[in-house]
Image: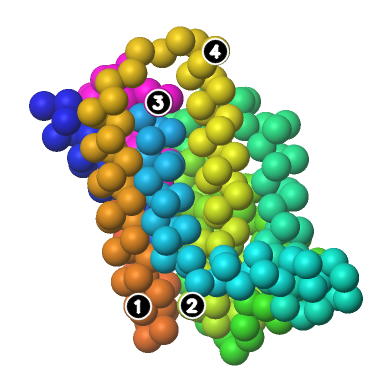
């Protein structure tokens, strides 16, 4: 039965890591609703799912990543525009590293609760609805200034709080800055590469420190499921944003938040 739960949680991770609905909130709520054993689906399983979603991003954006790497020497040598994408990604990664080092452990202990998830889901939904209606969205992600990239990095850092959604926070602020929806999503996904990698390494070091027991079949199921579902989600979501607003995700977030609050009260 644990293997079935592993596939379900891997699917949840693959979907919600990229959709603007908060993967951390869904994993917290799934465990709380169904009473799944946190000792079985602990730190090592979280790392496996992160490895899966990281693999999905790297494979989907393999062409863009290859071009960014090629542009690094040119940017260092003569400031070529081909090095601009990697520069923006690196600048935007800084806040998450600083905030993560200072606050991640405290947030893990104090704020990973269903109530915090519900509140964050609600505020995120309202922000999505507002930003869709107050700005025109016609800019590319590579037209950002360094200051705007840094602001998007701060939005990503706030997503350490469960329920905020890393992709949701970045895309919402990107829309406020005038980016096209799919441009904001692409930047959010590429920005997630160093952050997801660092999160996996950090959690992996904690596993070594605690000597947590490992079920490798369980981990493989979680990693493979999250990778396959994650790749499909990225492809679908970028196509969806080319034709639609974020309103459907805002409604979903509000419905989920209300459901959680009712569940907590009753």
Residue at 57 percent across and 66 percent down: it is: 65
For mark 1, give the secondary structure. helix
The residue labelled by disc 4 is 209
For mark 3, give the secondary structure. helix
Q: Residues within 10 Å of mark 3 (few under 14, many from 20)?
A: many
| In magenta stretch: residue 1 | no
Mark in the foreground, 3 or 2:
3
For mark 4, give the secondary structure. helix
The residue labelled by disc 3 is 44
The residue labelled by disc 2 is 182
From the top left corner, tell me how far across and down residue 10 is, in percent.
Answer: 28, 42
Q: Residue 26 appears in which quarter of the rendering?
A: top left
Whichever of callouts 3 and 2 sits on the residue coming sooner in the sequence is 3
Q: Quadrant of the C terminus?
A: top left
Q: Residues within 10 Å of mark 4 (few under 14, many from 20)?
A: few
Q: Is residue 144 visible?
A: no
């Amino acid at each position: 039965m644990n293997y079935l739960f592993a596939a379900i949680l891997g699917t949840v991770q693959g979907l919600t890591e990229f959709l603007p609905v908060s993967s951390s909130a869904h994993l917290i709520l799934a465990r709380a609703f169904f009473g799944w054993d946190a000792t079985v689906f602990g730190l090592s399983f979280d790392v496996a799912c992160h490895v899966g979603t990281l693999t999905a991003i790297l494979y989907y954006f393999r062409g863009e990543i290859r071009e960014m790497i090629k542009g690094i020497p040119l940017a260092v040598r003569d400031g070529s525009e081909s090095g601009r994408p990697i520069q923006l990604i690196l600048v935007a990664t800084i806040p998450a590293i600083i905030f993560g080092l200072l606050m991640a452990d405290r947030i893990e202990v104090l704020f990973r609760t269903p109530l915090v998830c519900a509140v964050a889901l609600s505020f995120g939904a309202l922000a999505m609805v507002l930003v869709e209606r107050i700005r025109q969205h016609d800019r590319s992600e590579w037209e950002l200034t360094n200051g705007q990239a840094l602001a998007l990095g701060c939005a990503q850092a706030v997503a350490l709080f469960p329920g905020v959604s890393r992709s949701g926070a970045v895309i919402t602020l990107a829309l406020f800055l005038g980016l096209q929806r799919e441009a904001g999503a692409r930047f959010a996904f590429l920005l997630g590469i160093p952050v997801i990698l660092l999160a996996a390494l950090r959690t992996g070091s904690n596993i070594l420190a605690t000597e947590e027991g490992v079920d490798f079949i369980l981990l493989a199921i979680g990693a493979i499921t999250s990778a396959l579902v994650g790749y499909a989600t990225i492809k679908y979501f970028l196509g969806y944003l080319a034709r639609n607003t974020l309103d459907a995700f805002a409604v979903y977030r509000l419905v989920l938040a209300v459901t959680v609050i009712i569940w907590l009260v009753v």
